């Protein structure tokens, strides 16, 4: 009986690193992809709002309450998104250091 290689049992031919085998669900990659989609959607909504409020302002149209408070809402959303990203990146960094120990 042959001994197992020092790096663990042999993988079948064509198998890549862990996480790339068929049928494997990478939860972290899914969550980051979902978060990127949410952030891009949020960016699209705020870009549309900026364009509408800028158009109304440039053409001297009446400014409604939504445009007057738009910058405050934009700043709040940007701060929340930044805090979420930093929290997730910090969690990933802690998870990697705890796995390596």
Image: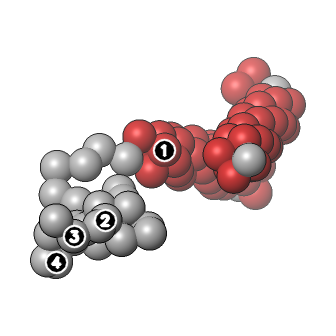
**Mark closest to the chain's N terminus, 2 or 1:** 2
- The mark closer to the camera, 4 or 2, is 2
Q: Is residue 58 above or below residue 89?
A: below
For the residues labelled 4 and 2, the Cα–Cα distance comes to: 19 Å
The image shows residue 98 at horizontal and vertical percentages of 72, 41
Circles 2, 3 touching at the beta carbon (< 8 Å): yes
**SS at circle 3:** loop
Judging by the rendered image, the residue that carries numbered circle 1 is 28
Residue at the disc numbered 4: 14
Q: Secondary structure at mark 4?
A: loop
Q: Which tag is nearer the camera, tag 4 or tag 3? A: 3
Way the structure is coloured: secondary structure
Residue at left 37%, top 47%? 26
- Label 2 or label 1, whichever lies nearer to me, is 2
How crowded pointer 1 is (Cα within 10 Å; few <14, some 14-19, many 20+) is rated as few
Q: Work out whether mark 4 precedes mark 3 in sequence or the reverse, and give the earlier one.
A: 3
């Amino acid at each position: 009986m042959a001994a197992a290689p020092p790096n663990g049992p042999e993988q079948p031919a064509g198998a890549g690193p862990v996480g790339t085998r068929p049928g494997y669900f990478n939860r972290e990659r899914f969550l980051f992809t979902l978060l990127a989609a949410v952030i891009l959607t949020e960016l699209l909504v705020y870009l549309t709002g900026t364009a509408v409020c800028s158009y109304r302002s440039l053409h001297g149209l009446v400014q409604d309450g939504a445009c007057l408070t738009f910058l405050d809402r934009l700043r709040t959303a940007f701060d929340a998104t930044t805090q979420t990203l930093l929290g997730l990146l910090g969690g990933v960094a802690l998870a990697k250091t705890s796995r390596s120990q």
